[in-house]
Amino acid sequence: MKILTGNDLKTGDVIWWTGKSWSRHIGEAVDAGDNGEAVLAEESAAQRVNAAYIVDAAASPNGPLPLHIKDRVRAAGPTVRADLGINPDVPIVKG
């Protein structure tokens, strides 16, 4: 599974591609499949996202789960203040 992520240009928030727009909630992310590069090019050119890239992920009961720990941290939110996290169901463990 390939999902897309980047940062919102106005707020800097981590955002995820939903198939139609961007969301702060990784549970709304969809598999971009082979279209990831094309979507990233279009969305970056339209200045709707900054520093966007493709993330390898696996399906989970709560939606896509990034395989790399860096992207799990980005999805969950700040590790120093769990109460500020946007996606608390994302486990911050290496695996």
Image: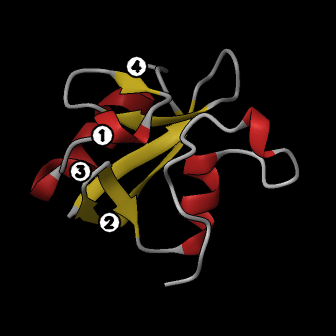
Q: Residue furthest left?
A: 34
The amino acid at mark 1 is: Ala
Q: Position of residue 45 (x, y in %)?
A: 41, 27
- The tag on residue 57 is 2
Say which element carries label 1: loop
Q: Earlier in the sequence, mark 2 or mark 3?
A: 3
Q: Residue at x 65, y 30 (%)?
A: 13
Q: CA distance from mark 1 to mark 4?
A: 20 Å
Q: Earlier in the sequence, mark 1 or mark 4?
A: 1
Q: Residue at x 50, y 29 (%)?
A: 24
In the rendered image, which quarter is residue 33 located in? bottom left
Q: Earlier in the sequence, mark 4 or mark 3?
A: 3
Characterize the local packing of mark 3: few (<14), some (14-19) or many (20 or more) Cα atoms within 10 angstroms.
Answer: some
Looking at the rendering, in which quadrant would you find the N terminus?
bottom left
Q: CA distance from mark 1 to mark 2?
A: 10 Å
In the picture of the structure, the residue carrying the numbered disc 1 is 29
Q: How is the image coloured?
A: secondary structure
Q: Position of residue 32 (x, y in %)?
A: 18, 49
Q: Are marks 2 and 3 in contact (CB under 8 Å)?
A: no
Q: Residue furthest bottom?
A: 95
Q: CA distance from mark 4 to mark 3?
A: 15 Å
